[in-house]
Amino acid sequence: MPVVHVDGADLHYEDDDFTDPWRPRETVVLLAHLSGDSDEYRAWVPTLARHYRVIRPDRRGLGRSTAPPLGYTYTLDTLANDTLALLDALGLEKVHLVGTSGGGIMAIHFAAHHPARVRSLTGVGTPAFVPAKAQGRFLRDGYPDGISALMAMGTWLYARTAAPLYTSRIPLQNELFMERMGRVPAHVLAGLMRMASTMDITPLLPRIAAPTLLLYAEQGQFDVAEQQMMARTIPACELHGIEAAGNITWDNPDECAKVVLRFLQRVTNGETIGEA
């Protein structure tokens, strides 16, 4: 099991590479949503890994990575440090960085603070901040706030009392989402929820130097106006809608991977991004 040791934790990652060994290759790093893990992008691998080395890390405390101690404080800075340590350990000077939802917020934060390490940036269903309506999903009846409910109920029950997060064309997707969420240690999920309530990368958008792609779901309740604002504010950015109703990473993975691959290849070939 591939891991890197960072600040007392073993951080697991998946490493897929089916490129031709005699050709130069670049690397893509895929960051899962807030409480997601490397399995989230499993369906993307066949499309991307034929052309790029694909690294899928498990965030500290998620998937097969070591959980931090009780009381650990998650911040965008500490998570960026983990990503930076992963790149250094793997000898990756510059990567194409992709993030979904909260993972996209983390990717934007990383790109703003470490521009020399980012070849391109892709946000998949990524907001500029976590709105109050989304944070309302943390709440449960009978508890003053989401974290109180989580710590009292435990992650498994907390996950299974959630309202459906996505309108999926595949009914078992929400069941799988709840099952995966139920594996996360309660103190880890609570720490991530605390961080989510403070995340806002709006001021960082003008600082993004890398060519950028934003993907959003064309159906459902996604805030297209926010995506348009982000695309206007990031200097070299393109916006692309995907036929999906919720988490487009899962709901339409084949189309997502194809669109991202075309974008990566344009960047690799030196094409200009973000101009008509």
Image (cartoon, rainbow, N blue to C red):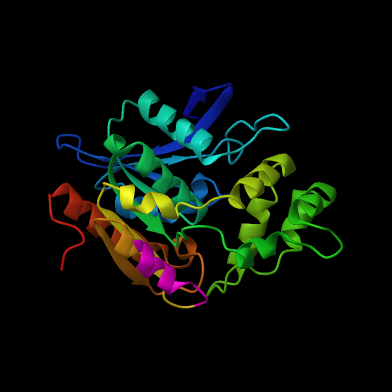
Determine whether 15 is above or below 181 in the image. above
Q: Is residue 258 visible?
A: no
Left or right position of 186 against 16 = right
Q: Position of residue 166 (x, y in %)?
A: 58, 69
Left or right position of 254 against 183 = left
Q: Residue furthest right?
A: 142
Q: Quadrant of the C terminus?
A: bottom left
Instruction: Give the residue displayed 57% in from the left and 74% down from the top.
Output: 167
Q: Is residue 102 visible?
A: yes
Q: Residue furthest front?
A: 203
Q: Position of residue 241 (x, y in %)?
A: 35, 71
Instruction: Give the residue displayed 56% in from the left and 49% down from the top.
Output: 36
Determine whether 79 is above or below 169 in the image. above
Determine whether 198 is above or below 237 in the image. above
Counting labels gives 0
Q: Position of residue 138 (x, y in %)?
A: 70, 59
Q: Is residue 79 magenta-colored?
A: no
Left or right position of 157 against 56 = right
Instruction: Give the residue displayed 79% in from the left and 48% down from the top.
Output: 154
Q: Residue furthest bottom?
A: 219
Q: Position of residue 16 (x, y in %)?
A: 36, 40
Residue 109: image quadrant is top left
Q: Nearer the viewer, residue 64 or 137?
A: 137
Determine whether 24 is above or below 242 in the image. above
Q: Main secondary structure of the magenta part?
A: helix
Q: Nearer the viewer, residue 126 or 156?
A: 126
Left or right position of 69 against 48 = right
Q: Which residues are magenta?
A: 220-230
